[in-house]
Image (spheres, coloured by chain):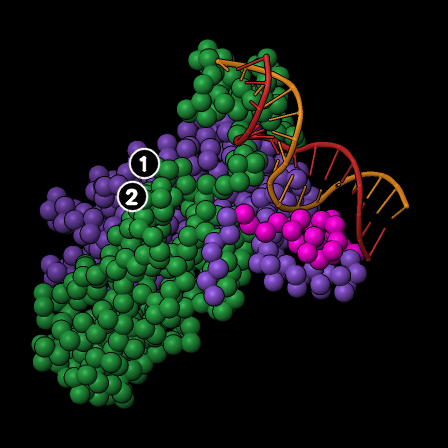
Chain colours: A green, B purple, C orange, D red
DNA sequence: TTGAAAGCGCTAACAC
DNA sequence: GTGTTAGCGCTTTCAA
């Protein structure tokens, strides 16, 4: 029985009339912990289901001056790590009836500004942004929003509000330290467009800092074009590096995608990994654990970032969080594997 | 100057008072094509920016009885193809001021039901669901929603409304036909949990149908556990298949992830691809085009699915779409590569 | 346990 | 070009 589409959706008023009660009683019947005669409640639910009534969250929220959702921005949908963070965050918030409103900015701070303005128009109860670099206007918008702001996946020098993240520079430094400890000296870097992907740029900064600290040549670097880093661009970058610096012993990559691309290029060129060249990535993506040889990488624990962010937001809502802006530091895990001779 | 968070956000009324005009004039000043004295408009914008006013979309939409968003459900965030579809869809809708409200159901029809109910409560102007198999209640909810419903990534036998998709069974049949034409006879299938991932199950059905049509043994199959198919499970499935059917000549996989996992397992076991074993995947993910050897796969053209869906929705809104439910069939592209000896 | 009135922030419709 | 009135669908508040 395909009834024609309803031009005017059924409202509470319609349900109330049909059930012979006031709208207020219907309203109460749809809240879990309100006092309504249980028979009345059952009748209302039956009538509502029969009429195809769908509760209007927008109207309810307008009146109650809340929105039941948390805005979240990530650079891109096509990244399993951000997906894991969002997933963990969603799960953590779902228990309190909060929904995630997700937006992505394609690694562009101007798009981020537009996106955040859009999201704020929907009056979220909190906003979670990925990364710690923003336009001045974005900072102003967030600062004046009057809601909790959490910057994740980074440890900004000058945070807007709360922070749940890690040092992108620091973990690449750890990676370089590991390689130097293993005896590698001529180490190159693939990736990091400083004008655009701020986390990628931080990672490159970490590389440079570590190389200088060890007194090594930090001049071996190849960009990989616009983020997100692709496997193809990783392969091209490896080609360039081996052309310019054929004696390179190890390559640290901004992401596992570039690292895997570089690895495939080595396979095509007959460069043995790790015997001729060591390769390290970032992100602990699925491919790193299974490719041949397996890739040494850094696991930023994206699920933990999401879970801790959810905890923080719930604590803020409940008023149980400590006063003032919180900074929750996550320690990424070094995952040693075959591509650096650690397998 | 960190001013304390605003407990009461600035409203149009506040801006109106501060600018010395009525709320209606402020309202008009924020719409592009309404007549307001240009000086007045400029003053209002200045005052609003100064006060940190943020337009309340929810309130506007409640009054205007629209929502400015399209609900979209996908199985998972962690899949670059669904991300591409959503991305193309978002872009197509953005011009008309429509925003995507995204939800994911982890390949579970019951979660899908809960998700869709949630999304409908926000009164979307249309709903796009990935896949053509749903619970009876989901079908009822969608059928009675009174908004356009589009099922994508599938060609359901009994569609709820509109359709933009392709035959998951059909394209695997094409792949089998190709392998048979190349002389392969003992072909196995990896993946497809029929109880859960309906598209995966359709692909398996396509495999079985094609094998029977060619009069070949369709008994070589290994599941890969819950969707999404992982690289690890692909590797395990290959191990099982080679144990049970050591003479297998080719493996068709439900997804590139399983195919790549199988490929790595071959590398570890010294099985040469394609000389000893041919491997084919599905999805045309990034890894397929760059791994060694490159993987033969099927490109379902996810961007096109999103773009065509956006076009359809805009045409429906504009009233320029043909009457009745539309079915837009996308033809996936076979991408031949080295793993089947086509490179 | 239930109901009536008021109003959340905005805009359609109608004045002027 | 601008203002006034009414009201979107729901919940807060107060009363019964």
Q: On the picture, is B87 further left or further right than C8? A: left
Please name the residue that numbered disc 2 is placed on: B227
x and y percentages locating residue B134 in the rendered image: 42, 32
Give me the disc on residue A203.
Answer: none
Q: How many discs appear?
A: 2
Residue at 25 percent of width and 66 percent of height: A282
Q: Position of residue B191 (x, y in %)?
A: 26, 44
Label 2: chain letter: B
Dot label at residue B196: 1
Residue A242 sits in which quadrant? bottom left
Do the residues bearing badges 1 and 2 touch, measured as CB atoms within 8 Å?
A: yes
Rendered residue at 27%/72% (across/down):
A169
Q: Tag 2, which secondary structure? A: loop
- Viewer can see residue A290: yes
Up-down: is A130 above or below A177? above
Same chain for the residues under marks 1 and 2 in the image: yes
Residue range of the region highlighted in magenta in the rendering: B8-35
Q: Position of residue A26 (x, y in %)?
A: 53, 21
**A9 displayed left or right of B42:** left
Q: Is residue B200 above or below residue A3?
A: below
Q: Quadrant of residue A277?
A: bottom left
Question: Is residue B64 found inside the magenta-colored segment of the image?
Answer: no
Q: Label 1 neighbourhood size at 10 Å, few (<14), some (14-19), many (20+)? A: some
Q: How many neighbours does mark 2 have within 10 angstroms: few (below 14), some (14-19), or many (20 or more)?
A: some
Please name the residue shown 21% across and 74% down the image: A173
């Amino acid at each position: 029985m395909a009834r024609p589409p309803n031009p005017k959706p059924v409202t509470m008023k319609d349900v109330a009339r049909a059930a012979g009660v006031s709208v207020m009683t219907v309203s109460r019947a749809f809240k879990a912990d309100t006092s309504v005669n249980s028979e009345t409640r059952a009748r209302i639910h039956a009538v509502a289901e029969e009429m195809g009534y769908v509760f209007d969250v927008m109207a309810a929220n307008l009146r109650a001056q809340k929105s039941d959702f948390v805005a979240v921005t990530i650079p891109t949908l096509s990244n399993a790590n951000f997906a894991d963070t969002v997933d963990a965050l969603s799960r953590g918030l779902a228990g309190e009836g909060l929904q995630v409103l997700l937006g992505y900015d394609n690694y562009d701070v101007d798009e981020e500004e537009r996106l955040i303005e859009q999201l704020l128009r929907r009056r979220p109860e909190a906003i979670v942004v990925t990364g710690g670099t923003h336009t001045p206007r974005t900072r102003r918008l967030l600062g004046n929003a009057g809601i909790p702001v959490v910057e994740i996946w980074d440890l900004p020098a000058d945070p807007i509000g709360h922070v749940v993240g890690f040092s992108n520079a620091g973990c690449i430094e750890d990676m370089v330290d590991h390689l130097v400890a293993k005896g590698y000296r001529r180490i190159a870097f693939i990736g990091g467009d400083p004008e655009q992907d701020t986390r990628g740029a931080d990672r490159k900064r970490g590389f440079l800092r570590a190389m200088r600290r060890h007194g090594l040549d930090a001049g071996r670097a190849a960009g990989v074009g616009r983020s997100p880093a692709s496997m193809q661009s990783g392969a091209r970058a490896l080609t360039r590096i081996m052309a310019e610096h054929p004696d390179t012993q190890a390559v640290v990559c901004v992401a596992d995608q570039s690292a895997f691309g570089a690895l495939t290029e080595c396979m095509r060129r007959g460069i043995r990994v790790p015997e001729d060249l060591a390769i390290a990535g970032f992100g602990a993506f699925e491919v790193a654990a299974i490719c041949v040889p397996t890739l040494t990488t850094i696991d930023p624990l994206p699920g933990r970032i999401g879970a801790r962010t959810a905890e923080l937001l719930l604590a803020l809502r409940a008023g149980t969080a400590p006063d003032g802006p919180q900074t929750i530091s996550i320690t990424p895990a070094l995952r040693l594997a075959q591509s650096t001779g650690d397998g």
